[in-house]
Amino acid sequence: MKIEVKNLTKYFGNFVALDNINLEIVEGELLALLGPSGSGKTTLLRMIAGLETVDDTDKGEILFNNIDVSKKDIGDRDIGFVFQHYALFKHMTVFENIAFGLRVKPKKQRLSNDEINKKVTKLLQLIQLDGFANRFPWQLSGGQRQRVALARALAVEPKVLLLDEPFGALDAKVRADLRKWLKELQEELGITTVLVTHDQEEALEVADRIVVISKGKIEQVGTPEEVFHNPANEFVINFLGNVNLFHGREEDGRLNIDSSLENQDNNSKFLIRPHELEIVSVNDSEAILQAKIKYIQLAGSQVKVELTHLENELKTVLVEISHYEFKEKNIKKGDIVGIRPRALRTFEDGAGI
Ligand SMILES: Nc1ncnc2c1ncn2[C@@H]1O[C@H](COP(=O)(O)OP(=O)(O)OP(=O)(O)O)[C@@H](O)[C@H]1O
């Protein structure tokens, strides 16, 4: 199913929750709506679902395969929905939870008991919970419950799958496992999927494309690689990870730091990610500033080094290097070193990254 959102503006009273959203969701893709709390992600998802309507005071339309569904009820949109909080029926077994949508279908469309049994058994295999059919939700872990919720949504063979922070309530390790699993499952089924998340890592890892939203507006739409490596603006680069802000001027591909340019135009603003900085010797001719090493965090896949500017102790710089490079350079807390950017790029609006 292809979904198009055209010129969509949603008001809650005088408050503009969505501001002229234009978006095309391609058949079979996994699209992540990523943004901070209150940016409008859930509102957009609920409008696609039909849980929130396009009222007379609102503007725009939502099309499913070129047909306007703006006024259609959730029941007529052929969607499956999974929320953050497990919405399983407590008094029903795993099997009955998954079978629920099939059993409540009108008699004419309803499958026979045999067919329902076959279908639920297949879904249990798909979510890797065969053998759990007769358990009750309280006998499952959080991750297992969310897999059952997903199977329940898939049972009625929806054309679109809408996921609102489905792993939000789970711990980091379970989340990481489940998102890998979801990605594989979604690719296998080829079902058009929209995932709401405020977790950058989650969006970068599972999505085919990411829509970055802030204050009801789309800031950028692109593949994970595009939004991470070619952010459209300052909001996107800041939202997608740590970033260092420097002020200065670029001359012959080299950045000359000049803190007197703070509060000036965007041309003096350079945003550089921690992994795009290098630690060099204090008198390296390509160093853009001198700094003192304040803190070294060795745990994790990269070594995180926090430094303070030598000229202004209140200013910190974050650098991420590999463990190999860290050992090779033999740096320690308290060392005075130079900082050199590995590359310089500029935004369309003038700010450099
Ligand atoms: N029914 C409503 N009535 C009034 N305001 C609403 C309603 N629903 C949402 N809002 C407001 O619209 C804005 C967007 O909310 P929304 O839930 O879409 O944000 P979100 O990006 O999903 O945030 P979160 O990550 O915190 O869930 C918020 O400021 C919220 O307070």
Image (spheres, rainbow, N blue to C red):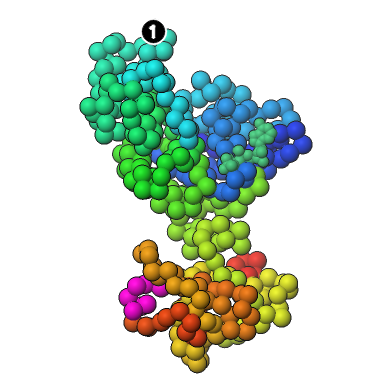
x, y (%) of residue 122?
25, 26
Can you tell which quarter of the image residue 140 is in?
top left
**Within the magenta stretch, is there residue 323?**
yes
Main SS, magenta residues: helix
Which residue position is annotated with label 1? 108
Which residue is depicted at the point 75% across and 33% down? 13
x, y (%) of residue 32?
48, 45
Which residue is depicted at the point 33% across and 22% down? 136
Which residue is depicted at the point 68% across and 70% down? 266
Can you tell which quarter of the image residue 117 is in?
top left
Q: How many marks?
A: 1
Span shown in magenta = 321-327
x, y (%) of residue 152?
38, 25
Q: How crowded is mark 1: few (under 14 residues within 10 Å), some or many (20 or more)?
A: few
Q: In this view, does 282 lie above or below 247?
A: below
Quarter placement of the C terminus:
bottom right
Query: What SS does tag 1 mark?
Result: loop
Q: Which residue lies furthest to the right in this view?
A: 14
Q: In which quarter of the image is ligand 1?
A: top right
Q: Residue furthest front?
A: 334
Residue 272 can be seen in this image: yes
Q: Which of 223 and 215 is in front in this view?
A: 215
Quarter placement of the N terminus:
top left
Q: Which amino acid does label 1 sit on?
A: Lys
**Within the magenta stretch, is there residue 64?**
no
x, y (%) of residue 248?
64, 80
Asked if residue 295 lies left or right of residue 156, the reply is right
